[in-house]
Image (tube, rainbow, N blue to C red):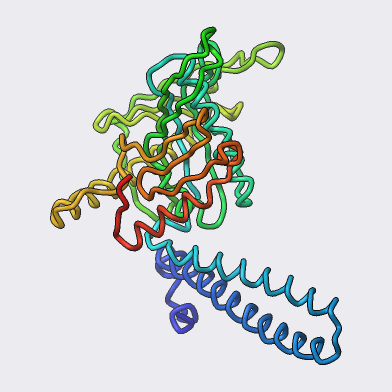
Amino acid sequence: MNIEIENPDLWNDPKHAQEVSKEKKMLDDIVGSFSRLTAGVNDAADLFELSMAEEDWDTVEAVGADVDAIEKEVAGLEFKRMFNQPMDPANCYLEIQAGAGGTEAQDWASMIERMYMRYAERKGFKVTLEEETPGEVAGIKSATLFIEGEWAYGTLRTETGIHRLVRKSPFDSNARRHTSFSSVYVYPEVDDSIDIEINPADLKIDVFRASGAGGQHIQKTESAVRIHHVPTGIITICQDDRSQHRNREKAMQQLKAKLYELEMRKRMEEQTKLEEQKSDIGWGHQIRSYVLDQSRVKDLRTSVETGNTGAVLDGDLDQFIEASLKQQVGGTRTDA
């Protein structure tokens, strides 16, 4: 790797040079982490031995806290080991669509939006609300989040699928149980190093006024942009910027990302057919059930279950995501 970086001819191919630089930074970060952790373990061992000999129990306790921190960082490195797809280091888009069911489903979609925004904050990711279509009474019909951070796509890619909610509806005067569905679709940001050919003749581009709460800040210009890729039926919308040009640019980036993800899915499906197996994760596949009146959230792929529904809806998704990533790496499935 260092020999290739030092090669003066490397930058004759800027695209390849960018890929090599990105890979080198990733490897340097991993090596640096291992070196730092090794030094930390050795220092902790020496300090523990010394403090035990001197019966310095405060220092012993402090060493224990240091070891706990090291253990947590090692667990983080083990988690990153599960990222085995080319786009895993990339930023990503997370798209939410309310299912059929009107207000109840739209309220559920807004709960999911909040859940993933809280999860992203917990992980130190930056979240931008690219598009949001309000519900008719409450909640949202759809939303697109742009999530930036190290391994954002790798972390969230197994969240694609259908999320099912069962609860006593706050919108039902008789407080009856209702079942609602919302879909989540996660796809990576595609940068300029990946070529995605788009024929301008295949695009239908519309502009419209961005939706909002109204009042003095209501948009008076048609700054929101909708791009329809006719051959695939893919539609992207961006309305978070006051500039139509910037919204158009972002909507085109989303389109490239969706077309890339579509191509990757086609390849995976072809590989799956050859192996005579079904893909674990697929659009339209129900992945998790949230039964609030029984205080139960269960992942239907891994059978991981918890009774702390409040924490899950507040973004505590680590146990579900880690289990689904491990399952993909192991190539096994646990039937619910």
* Residue 181 point in image, percent of width and height: 40, 27
Q: Examine the rendered structure and indicate whether residue 29 appears above or below residue 268.
A: below
Q: Using the image, determine if residue 178 lies above or below residue 113.
A: above
**In which quadrant will I find the N terminus?**
bottom left
Compared with residue 51, is residue 236 higher up or lower down, i.e. above or below? above
Q: Nearest the camera: 208 or 78?
A: 78
Numbered marks: total: 0
Task: Name the quadrant containing residue 235.
Answer: top left
Query: Which quarter of the image is occupied by the C terminus?
Result: top left
In the image, residue 244 sits, relative to residue 150, either above or below, namely: above
Residue at screen point 24% across, 31% down: 231
> From the viewer's perspective, is 47 left or right of 243?
right
Q: Is residue 83 left or right of residue 34?
A: left
Query: Which residue is the extreme one toward the front?
Result: 294
User: Closer to the camera, 87 or 324?
Assistant: 324
Q: Position of residue 276 (x, y in %)?
A: 14, 53
Q: Is residue 21 left or right of residue 185?
A: right
How far from the left and from the top, in percent, is residue 113? Answer: 54, 32
The residue drawn where x is 37% and y is 38% is: 161
Percent x, y of residue 39: 67, 84
